[in-house]
Image (tube, rainbow, N blue to C red):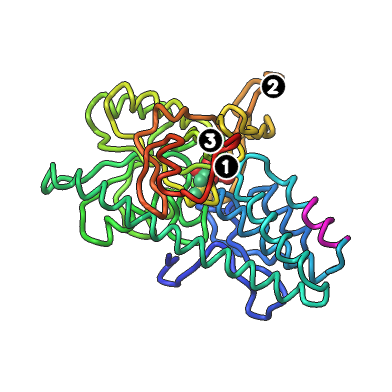
Amino acid sequence: MKVNGTPYRPIWQAADGEAVEIIDQTRLPHAFVTERLSTAADAAHAIKAMLVRGAPLIGATAAWGLWLAMREDSSDTGLVRAYDSLIVTRPTAVNLRWALDAGRAKLSAIAPADRVDAAAAFARHVCDEDADLNHAIGRHGLEIIKDIAAKKPGEPVNVLTHCNAGWLATVDWGTATSPIYQAHDSGIPIHVWVDETRPRNQGAFLTAWELQNHGVPHTVIVDNAGGHMMQRGLVDLCITGTDRVSANGDIANKIGTYLKALAAHDNGVPFYVALPSPTIDWTLDDGMDIEIEERSASEVTRIPGRLDDGSIAAVTITPDGSPAANPAFDVTPARLVTGLITERGVCAASPDGLRSLFPEHRAAGE
Ligand code: MRU
């Protein structure tokens, strides 16, 4: 996608071939800053501190992290050390494990001397594949939007999304946003309700910035407004991303997703979840077994923003001494999900639905 007319991905190999570059997402929307990652430790830090975030981008950054690690030490010990340092960066997005497992398998099968080039080729492949998968998700999701648009000619289709499952969270297109961008680009009038997504405000900071850059009409709403909007008939469908789908179709996504799914269910609003297949965890039969990341209380007690003089500051919003809890994800049971939009098509959020599109996989225990 483009930023001020220049095409960008959120991660790329530096032109000098000596590092990886990323868009620092902790600086958006008020500053567009890129950072160089020169070591595996830089890559691990970028994931942990959320300079990069979003399940597919976490996987892609880990893949580039393996390349950076192989440049430092391509021995078997170096490979184990790299895997171990990257796998612990964030626990919920399964794309991290997927990328590291695939990268380790590839690299451990070849001689240490060949590992640097092979790791770079692997990381490039992970990135290009993610962009392709997300584009395909968009094509399938577009059909859903087209069907709704046909029922309200001349009126915009109102989509509600939570967090940022946009191109910033992936290598390109985004997952939840891919159908939105493709609908907008094909001339379908579309409007997006953007949940602010406390505590880190990925909706208000990142999704709004992306949509604005691309010219997609949107409105930021507080997290608590979604149910009201649905009751008033102002939401035609919800589309979110996910960090992990268990083999029974439960989905883990940014905290608050479950409440949106409940409200959608109560109001007969379709609730779709968009995902590339590396986000499916075939080893888990039950979404309740997905590890939920607990983050720092300071993300709840403090909030950053731009002051009127243009400077960036964080302020404290809770009484001194009040404890805060910060679960970063929740699990939406499959029964509340209308459908899963994947690169191979749309399926029911169920073991049979997933297997119909991915027959090469078998759920755990089968
Ligand atoms: O904590 P984050 O910002 O990494 O959480 C991101 C999300 O919850 C996204 O919805 C999910 O990773 C899907 S990204 C295509």
Most common SS among magenta residues: helix
Residue on which the image places disc 2: 320
Number of residues whose C-alpha sits closer than 10 Å to that of mark 2, classed few (under 14), some (14–19) or many (20 or more): few
Q: Badges 2 and 3: C-beta atoms under 8 Å apart?
A: no
Image quadrant assignment for residue 173: bottom left
Badge nearest the viewer, 1 or 2? 1
Image spot of residue 270 (x, y percent): 30, 34
Badge nearest the viewer, 1 or 3? 1
- Front position in the image: 360 or 134: 360
Residue on which the image places disc 1: 282
Q: Residue at x 67, y 72 (%)?
A: 120
Q: Which residues are magenta?
A: 77-84
Q: CA distance from mark 2 to mark 3?
A: 32 Å
Image spot of residue 232 (x, y percent): 23, 26
Image spot of residue 199 (x, y percent): 56, 34
Residue on which the image places disc 3: 252
Q: Secondary structure at mark 2?
A: loop
- Front position in the image: 99 or 10: 99
Q: Residue at x 79, y 51 (%)?
A: 85
Q: Is mark 3 within 8 Å of ligand 1?
A: no
Q: Secondary structure at mark 3?
A: strand
Inspect the magenta stretch and tell me whether residue 82 lies in it: yes
Q: Residue at x 62, y 54 (%)?
A: 59
